[in-house]
Amino acid sequence: MQSLIEIELLAVAEPHRRRGIATALLATAEESARNAGGHLAFAKVRIGAFTTMHWYRKCGYTVAAQSEPVVFRTRWGLESRDDGSDGYQLAVKALQPGIVLRRRMERDSSMLIAEHDA
């Protein structure tokens, strides 16, 4: 995997919400990233922001559990991106065919791993 795209801020003013604007903006950002060779999109979601987490899930993202690390398998090895210890959880979505997200259980914890499908 070569390219990670972070959605740093996506907001719509309150009077214009629930009209599909944010969904259209996200789809446009994803398509642009995909066309530029991006493999994976991620966004940080504040812990407890359940409405935002639900929206990302509805848009095809996998939301990591609180304190669950997300690990990206790159051609150079494993690189951990985040574990939510900063008050956020990651919402992650594959942008290219053949990239998969797998939840791996190890002992009493889990992690999300993004990698090329074998």
Image: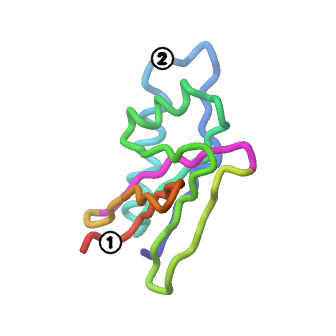
Residue with the most extreme bottom position = 76
Horizontal side of 72 relative to 48 (left or right) equals: left
Name the quadrant of the N terminus.
bottom left
Residue 87 covered by magenta stretch = yes
Q: Quadrant of residue 24?
A: top left
Residue with the most extreme front position = 107
Image spot of residue 56 (x, y percent): 46, 37
Picture disc at residue 18: 2
Q: Residue at x 49, y 43 (%)?
A: 63
Amino acid identity at mark 1: His
Q: Is 61 situated above or below 94?
A: above
Horizontal side of 113 relative to 10 (left or right) equals: left
Callout 2 secondary element: loop
Label 2: few (<14), some or many (≥20) within 10 Å? Answer: few
Picture disc at residue 106: none
Q: Residue at x 27, y 69 (%)?
A: 117
Amino acid identity at mark 2: Arg
Helix, strand or loop for the magenta stretch, by majority: strand
| Residue range corresponding to the magenta coloring | 86-96
Mark 2 or mark 1: which comes first in sequence?
2
Find the distance from the CA under tag 2 to the CA under tag 1. Answer: 35 Å
Q: Is 107 situated above or below 10?
A: below
| Location of mark 1 (residue) | 116
Horizontal side of 59 relative to 50 (left or right) equals: left
Label 1: few (<14), some or many (≥20) within 10 Å? Answer: some
Image spot of residue 118 (x, y percent): 24, 74
